[in-house]
Image (cartoon, rainbow, N blue to C red):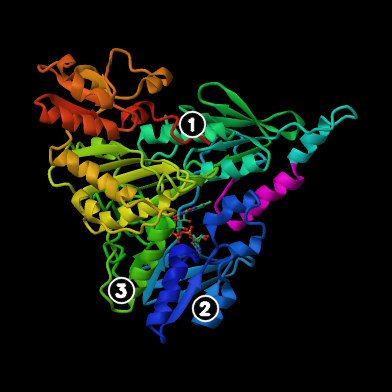
Amino acid sequence: MKVIIVGGVAGGASCAARLRRLDEKAEIIMVERGPYVSYANCGLPYHIGGVIEKESSLLVANEKTFREQFAVDCRTRCEAIAVSPEKKTVQLRNVATGEVTTESYDKLVLSPGAPSIRPPLPGIDLPGIFQVRTVPDARAIREWIEKGSLFLSGMNSYSGFQTVRPKPHAVVIGGGFIGLETAENLVHRGFDAVVLELGDQILAPIDQEMARIVEGYVERHGIRLALNDGVAGFKQAANDTLSVLTKSGKSHPADLVILALGVRPDTTLAKSAGLEIGQRGGIRVDEQMRTSNPDIFAVGDAVEVKDFVTGEWSLIALAGPANRQGRIAADVIAGRDSRFRGSQGTSVIGLFGATAAWTGASEKTLKRIGDKDYEKVYLYPNSHAGYYPGARPIAMKVIFRKSNGKLLGAQALGEDNVDKRISAFAMALQMGATIYDLEEAELCYAPQFGSAKDPVNFAGMVAADVLRGDMPLSHWDSAEKGFLLDVREPFELAVEDVPGAAHIPLGQLRARLGELPRDKEILVICRSGQRAYSATRLLLQNGFKARNLAGGMLSRFHTLILTN
Ligand SMILES: Cc1cc2nc3c(=O)[nH]c(=O)nc-3n(C[C@H](O)[C@H](O)[C@H](O)COP(=O)(O)OP(=O)(O)OC[C@H]3O[C@@H](n4cnc5c(N)ncnc54)[C@H](O)[C@@H]3O)c2cc1C
């Protein structure tokens, strides 16, 4: 059997290696247009920032590895330019010489990825404007920073009296994870970095109130955010620098511009082969990564996948799914019955020592599709036992089915061990777990790692309390409808008060029940919802109508949770 794989990075390289492990006899050709295969594009922002100093560290495997260890005919600088499904051939162009050859295949795997979006804006080809997708892209950015216009602009304002160079300016266009990671690294390299974002929040997959926490945090660490504003064009300015012009009419000076507007599936070959393209613009595949042509498979960023929670077709450009899909395509080609389960979009990003991570459906996605059968809880548990040094709060939002408790999604932000919590939620979600399962999950505990009730258990307990009716819940957006009761201590009110709320500290509540109305619903407030839970239970058992205001004061503005 002869298999040709187009694209030699995440999906393609995984497919080639797996196929060889399953079939020693297959003839495998893997072609890659660029100079490298199997490189770590996820590490590129950190190479730009100097965290990963050596470029060679990004090259996980090379042509030689594939040839010697896997007996794969691995060809770099070799582009697949056309597919003939009728003849079962692919035309390959040697990028260096331009020579075109034709290879036949029994099975073809496409893993061409998703190039960065590069809109045809005025001035987009000016020097100093880069994207972050490949090793050569990162090299060009590093060279520009080290030797380029930045150096000249610094020298232009140099004088005997002024020996300090002005801070160079970077404008990053796009507030997704590639844009933010690159912006952080540019800040570490001494840039004044502006992130320009057309939407009203950064990190589009998470809900806005959670994104607000990240926004406050990155701003405190030196990134300037310009939300609700898109790029309109670029102009050459004085001193070999640029101006980034925005839709709202603003102009941002820039020594360096990074385009991080998102990615678009590369469907060029798929279209030329007449393969079905889905409604989201990616290559349509079945659970076994087969395209509309049974001898052609497609994997990675170029394909549409089923959203694991909503069942919708979606585009999810992540390394984990690409690797797994490459492996599944290899399994199926080798005669195994592997299937892709859909993607939950499980993601993580580190920014200035903090972490944001999420899995599954966001509330805004559920609202967009008109799904009303959900409830959400906010909680702020410590990352590990509070008495052990270094514990930090984790802001968590957990979304679940109101009708049966099934976990739908989770988002978490914090400075310690956020990723392991979201990984636990992600695993639970894929196994179809309910919040009742989270209550019972047996997780690692010693004081430096977690709590006897881990944040994941805690989320399950809070959510289960809500669904069992032990803790009726309300949210701040409907708070004006009830009688507000604040059970915090007086010194906490001095920091932040809730206008119009009655105030009875929890410790005095039993003795002062006579001050509360029996004909109105009482909405109970504390700092994070925990004392309000006790107060709500106390009130309910004394015949009052009471609800806990989810997440307490911390969820009211969702801003100052990460304080460093
Ligand atoms: C800067 C950056 C940071 C990232 N960080 C993360 C992260 O932290 N976590 C995460 O999960 N994901 C991350 N990703 C996304 C992740 O890298 C991708 O989801 C993954 O690489 C997709 O794999 P793929 O095989 O579909 O495409 P790619 O890895 O992009 O590989 C496609 C390859 O195909 C080649 N190709 C295309 N067309 C042809 C052709 N006609 N002939 C020959 N070769 C061709 C391209 O040159 C390219 O090298 C990041 C991506 C970038 C760019």
Q: Position of residue 412 (x, y in %)?
A: 38, 43
Q: Is residue 356 left or right of residue 431?
A: right
Q: CA distance from mark 3 to mark 2?
A: 21 Å
Q: Which mark is residue 216?
A: 1
Considering only order in the chain, which callout, 1 or 3, is on the residue closer to the N terminus? 1
Label 3, secondary structure: give it: helix
Q: Can you say whether 490 is above or below 176 in the image? A: above
Q: Can you say whether 530 is above or below 62 in the image? A: above
Q: Disc 2 marks which amino acid?
A: Asp
Rendered residue at 41%/81% (across/down): 21
Rendered residue at 24%/35% (across/down): 367
Give the residue at mark 2.
Answer: 73
Q: Is residue 349 visible?
A: yes
Q: CA distance from mark 3 to mark 1?
A: 47 Å
Magenta segment boundaries in residue numbering: 131-148
Give the residue at mark 3.
Answer: 332
Q: Can you say whether 266 is above or below 403 in the image? A: below
Rendered residue at 56%/77% (across/down): 65
Q: Nearer the viewer, residue 303 or 56?
A: 56
Q: Is residue 1 visible?
A: no
Q: Is residue 399 left or right of residue 21?
A: left
Callout in the foreground (3, 2)? 3
Quadrant assignment for the N terminus: bottom left
Determine if the magenta segment contains residue 210.
Answer: no
Q: Nearer the viewer, residue 212 or 490?
A: 490
Quadrant in which residue 400 is drawn: top left
Label 2, secondary structure: give it: strand
